[in-house]
Amino acid sequence: MMRDKTFKSTLFGKLSQLYSEMAEAYNQAAGKIGLSCRGCPDNCCTSYFQHHTYIEWAYLWTGIRSCAEEKQREFMNRAREYVRQSRDLLNQGLSPRIMCPLNDNGLCQLYEYRLMICRMHGVPNSLVRPDGKKMSFPGCIRCQELYSHLEEVSVLDRTRFYRNLASLEMAFVGPKIKVLPRVKLTLADMLIQEPPGT
Ligand code: SF4
Ligand code: SF4
């Protein structure tokens, strides 16, 4: 996956643009429901979820490398602890609820670099997978409480974002996409190992 530097930064530029489009669609959807994260007691950065693209993983690492070394060490220490604790809980059949290693005092420290799943979590959203299967996500608890009183809820269809991200991923990984292992990593997993070939 060693891609030429200029090619890689062009793809990162496209990913950043795609992230902005996601943010715009998210803000519109949240605005319609009246959802705001301000003062939320239920920080969703403790949710346990996995991410699936090499390009997002590599872009996240450009964010990590832009931080001061001491901060990077702090993230890595927390990530190792996160992985250790979450493995213990999973082995006991429990679902981990541990704060993401990138969150300080309730705020994401790499907000511009956060991944698609972090960006879409709050509002009800759906997508149609390439095999035609429709997946639906209800949004966060605070959001569900807000829209439980509404007669009609608009659901953000994120299929176009999903497809665009898949195209960027294919361009980023190149022909090796057929042989590389599928990415299925928590944010903490993504911190304790760098993406291959970067
Ligand atoms: S997305 Fe929902 S759960 Fe997460 S911080 Fe915002 S309001 Fe709270
Ligand atoms: S990357 Fe940022 S937004 Fe995503 S879970 Fe971690 S702290 Fe929260």
Image (cartoon, grey):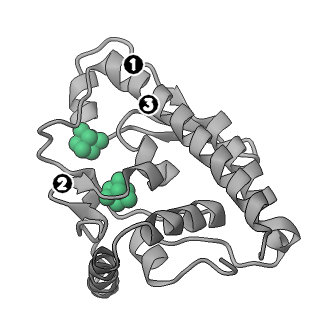
Quarter of the image containing the N terminus?
A: bottom right
Instruction: Name the mark on residue 106.
Output: 2
Locate residue 52, reporting x and y percent: 59, 63
Q: Tell me which amino acid carries mark 3.
A: Tyr
Q: Residue at x 64, y 47 (%)?
A: 13
Amino acid at dot 2: Gly
Which sits earlier in the primary sequence, circle 2 or circle 3? 3
Element marked by disc 1: loop
Tell me if 17 is positioned left or right of 36 in this view: right
Question: Dot 2: few (<14), some (14–19), or many (≥20) neighbours within 10 Å?
Answer: some
Give the mark, 2 or 1, whose residue is nearer the N terminus.
2
Q: Is residue 49 visible?
A: yes
Q: Quadrant of residue 105?
A: bottom left
**Distance from Cα at disc 1 to Cα at disc 3:** 14 Å
Residue 173, how many percent across, how many down?
Answer: 77, 67
Q: Amino acid at mark 1?
A: Val
Residue 140 in percent (x, y) is at 30, 41
Q: Classify mark 3: residues with Cα within 10 Å, few (<14), some (14-19) or many (20+).
A: many
**Residue for point 27% across, 52% down:** 44
State whether label 3 is within 8 Å of ligand 1: no
Q: Is residue 32 above or below residue 64?
A: above
Relative horizontal placement of residue 39, taking residue 137 as reference (left or right): left
The answer to whether residue 96 is above or below residue 42 is below
Look at the numbered disc 1 and say if its residue's Cβ is closer than 8 Å to ligand 1.
no
In this figure, which residue is indicated by the disc labeled 3?
26
Q: Secondary structure at mark 2?
A: loop
Residue bearing mark 1: 153
Mark 2–mark 1 Cα distance, whole angstroms, equals 28 Å
**How far apart in space, not on screen, are marks 2 and 3 (Cα)?**
20 Å
Q: Residue at x 80, y 57 (%)?
A: 171
Q: Which mark is residue 196?
A: none
